[in-house]
Amino acid sequence: MTLETFQPWLNFVHPVTMWLLLATTLYALYLGVQARKTRLADAETRKELIKGKFALKHHKVGSALLAFMVIGTVGGMGATYLESGKLFVGPHLLVGLGMATLIATSAALVPFMQKGSETARLTHISLNIVLVGLFGWQAVTGMQIVQKLLERLSQG
């Protein structure tokens, strides 16, 4: 087996991975909302919510997202380069690079959040809301790219 055997299918690793990461991002959003709800709840409600360990789960899922989003971004660029010998500088690539920057910046705020900075928390939340919106847009434009790849595969 050679790279040429797998190369046409390498183009689909990135989109499948990104769809899984989008679903994981939505789960991380849920966990983050629950962690904030726990932090802001009255004593009785907080006592019950703490059992869900939402903050710990949010932190773990967020760490995995950071790693896999950066790997997915580089992997998508690598697959494109292997397929065509160049990168196509356009909205999908630029937004993907922006998303990698947003998630890295968001993660960099964690030490400040752990020290109680509400500004860091609100910035973290804002960056991640933008990230989720961009991720949705990337899913749509990515499927348009996948459609073009499928058409090219069916033509020969």
Image: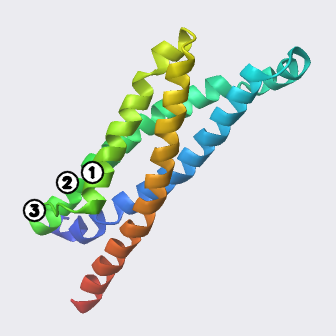
Disc ID at residue 86: 3
Q: Secondary structure at mark 2?
A: helix
Q: Does residue 48 sit above or below 70 in this rendering?
A: above
- The residue identified by callout 2 is 78
Q: What numbered label is drawn on residue 75?
A: 1
The answer to the question of whether label 1 and label 3 lie on touching residues, with beta carbons closer than 8 A, is no
Location of residue 156 in the rendering, given as x and y in whole percent from the top left corner: 21, 89
Q: Nearer the viewer, residue 143 or 37?
A: 37
Q: Looking at the picture, which amino acid does disc 3 mark?
A: Lys
Kindly identify the residue that appears in the image at 88 percent across and 23 percent down. Answer: 45
Residue 137 visible: yes
Q: Residue furthest front?
A: 119
Q: Residue at x 30, y 68 (%)?
A: 9
Q: Is residue 147 left or right of residue 39?
A: left
Q: Secondary structure at mark 3?
A: loop
Q: How far apart in space, not on screen, are marks 2 and 1 (Cα)?
A: 5 Å
Q: Nearer the viewer, residue 153 or 108?
A: 108
- Amino acid at dot 2: Gly
Mark 1 and mark 2 in contact (Cβ < 8 Å)? yes
**Tag in front: 1 or 3:** 3
